[in-house]
Amino acid sequence: MDARLRRVNKEIADCKNDKTSNISLELVDNSPFHLKGSFPGPEDTPYQGGHFEVDIIIPDSYPFQPVKMKFITKVYHPNVSSASGAICLDILKDAWSPVLTLKSTLISLQSLLCSPEPNDPQDAEVAKHYTTSKGSFDETARYWTQIYAGGPGPKDVKESRVSGAARDDVAIAGLEKAHVDQFEGIGFPRNKVIDVLRRLNYRGANVAQISEDRIVEELLKP
Amino acid sequence: MDDDDMEMDDYNDDFKLNTGPKRKSYEVDYSSLSQTSVEKSMREDVDHICGILGVESPVAALLLRHQAWNKERLIEKYMETPTTVLVESGATVPEPVAAPTPVRSHSVDKSTASPSSSRRATRSSSKLLSSLTSPTRLSFQKSNSISPSGTASPSKSRKDTKSEEPESFVCPICFDDSPDLKQLALDCGHVACSGCWNAYTTSKIRDEAEHSIRCMTEGCALVASDDFVRNILSDAAPAGTDVHENAVAWSRFQELLVRNFVAANQKLKFCPYPGCTNTVSCPSAAGKSVITSIVPTVSCGARGIPGSSSDKAGSSSSGVLQAREHVFCFGCTIESDHRPVVCAVAKLWLQKCEDDSETANWIKSNTKECSQCQSTIEKNGGCNHMTCKKCKYEFCWVCMGPWSEHGTAWYSCNRYDEKGSIDARDAQSRSRASLERYLHYYNRWANHEQSAKLSVELYAKTEKKMEDMQITSELTWIEVQFMKKAVEEVEKCRMTLKWTYAMAYYLARGNEKDLFEDNQRDLEKAVEDLSELLESPIETENIPTLRQKVTDKTVYVQKRNEIVLEDTATGFQDGRWRWNITVDGFEDPLEDSKVD
Ligand SMILES: [Zn+2]
Ligand SMILES: [Zn+2]
Ligand SMILES: [Zn+2]
Ligand SMILES: [Zn+2]
Ligand SMILES: [Zn+2]
Ligand SMILES: [Zn+2]
């Protein structure tokens, strides 16, 4: 039997038999080389209560070259692209070793959620948010967990965010409603305001650093 | 060398490397080395280290690679802390621990793969290992033999060594448990089957261009010796692996080792042409961050690109191009031959072009409008003498002025009369003037580049002409080669001309610059003349005359080119050139010659 196939089949079986890790693997399109992995968000993090799915492609030269993984579930995290789900993690690149497995790699992803590496970011904007205002970052990450990963409703999130079933664009961007309203009130389109404030990292202590003129200047750019 | 030898060189002109006493001022001393001869130098270094440090040659090789082939530093460090140096280079495992523990559990649980499971540090651990079981130094084990560092048995418990019953072996990487599986480990004892080692090694070499093949176990830093790699790609490769693929991987591995050695030595450069494994040694251009007195244009001596379609029928003209000599600059990666201008100035110029590309984009375009009837004209040959197909207006491609004014005197097109123009301009139009000044040089630079590129077509046209000539005249194939020679010369000189404009842009005003531009103009005129002749239609009865003319002009062009290159090169050697801008490695410009 093909060594790669044997190895992957064994890994899938091992994962099924292991009841303690909470890691699951399933085939996509009946191919053992395209899988979907999932795990619960780690406790005591903004990802707690969420269910995170990962797209897994087993390359031809597996396990001698690293497995390709990216998040299917949207995750608000400095080392995960908020747009594409691409992951920045050393073992998925040069630190890969053939003795690592799908399960151990997924466990590493899970622990990446516990300990972000903002100095080696995949998503620079999210990383900025993380380093400048951790509290606000946690809130946004929790909101993402709630709306994208099926996490529980917020316990201490402001009233404005839970009201209404629709997803709150302001909360997704990790911004304050009052700030967005303020510039929307001047006459700029809401989407653009959210975009600019997010890009400028208009959050927490940073708000005092950025003049309103600067924001208007950005908003006026085509 | 005496005079007799010098004359002998004349007969060997085609084969000489630029090392003889007849070297021209614009040439540099260098020699070309084959992969085999670089490997010989590597072996000498390895032997040297073996002798001094008393290690085996596979260990010496790893040590040298880790210290970037700096023998003195390696010896010094090794004398201080041999164990650290050995461990860091991947030659031995850290921390001596008496009893081996099982390598890795069957279930590939991450928790058992901790780096600390590495055991045993031995300076010559390979010896120790072979004394235990393996007859070779490569730790190859027959199946069913006892692994020296414990087996990869499913059990997590520490195994007593030398158990009587051969354990059944399951490869921890691929989970194969066939009884005839060959087990293999580096000195760390992290066992896997030979199939996995083979696939891993091949993948590292082929997919990652990696010569340092580390142990497969996470956290283990041991590096496979060259002997191990060779073996796993040959004798120890499991049945069923592609023999050809193994051979390719092994030869690629050897190339990677040579590249590593060459990269560590400032006197050496690996030939950048695809598929070539030659190295050029050029000590006179080594180790300087900026080379100010020479342009180190070198060649590895080989031609063509292996595996390219050069010998395919019907592509003879591209064949000519693909069979080019492997010429490159030892000092930079800007362009293969940017003579006469030195690397630093060439780099400044390209940076400038990149920055101003928006503004200058329109010039690069291959089409222009006829200044008389406004119809679009496409340039499709190297010659600047354009004739509008529609209105028959004859004009110069570079300046768009009427060709009649150029006539035999093509002066107005290579010089930008800076003095006159500066007088004419007032302070307000300075920035406009500086852009125009730049565009003047850029225009001519881009024109020669484009013309040189179009030489592919010129080659094709010329070959067609050569064939026609054979049919319509008495001339043989050999006798019509003058056309090809002329085309090659034109292309070569256009490259020189191109870079003379980069040089002239930065030259400080004065006599030296005037003389430089005189030489530039003479070459340009000669090249355009010859280029025009090559594109003119051929009448059968005139072929002997044409041949004479082309041959004469080719010789003349060659001479003019020689003059430009010689004069510029001696200027660099004498420190004669002054710039209008600060250039790395040169004196700062005089205040009054500065240009923004
Ligand atoms: Zn195996
Ligand atoms: Zn190892
Ligand atoms: Zn070459
Ligand atoms: Zn150069
Ligand atoms: Zn016209
Ligand atoms: Zn002109």
Image (cartoon, coloured by chain):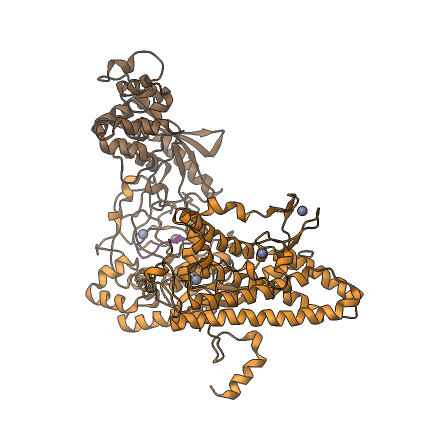
Chain colours: A brown, B orange
Q: Nearer the viewer, residue A14 or A95?
A: A95
Q: Nearer the viewer, residue B59 or B511?
A: B511
The answer to whether residue B101 is above or below residue A169 is below
The part of the image, by quadrant, that contains residue A193 is top left
Q: Position of residue B83 (x, y in %)?
A: 22, 61
Does residue B242 appear to the left or right of A80 in the view shown? right
Magenta stretch: helix, strand or loop mostly: loop
Q: Position of residue B248 (x, y in %)?
A: 50, 57
Q: Position of residue A87 (x, y in %)?
A: 36, 36
Q: Position of residue B429 (x, y in %)?
A: 42, 47
The answer to whether residue B450 is above or below residue A110 is below
Quadrant for the C terminus of chain A, please: top left
Residue A28 covered by magenta stretch: no
Q: How many marks?
A: 0
Residue B182 covered by magenta stretch: yes
Q: Nearer the viewer, residue B579 or B458?
A: B579
- What residue range appears in magenta? B181-191
Q: Is residue B235 visible?
A: no
Q: Is residue B445 visible?
A: yes
Does residue A11 appear to the left or right of B304 in the view shown? left
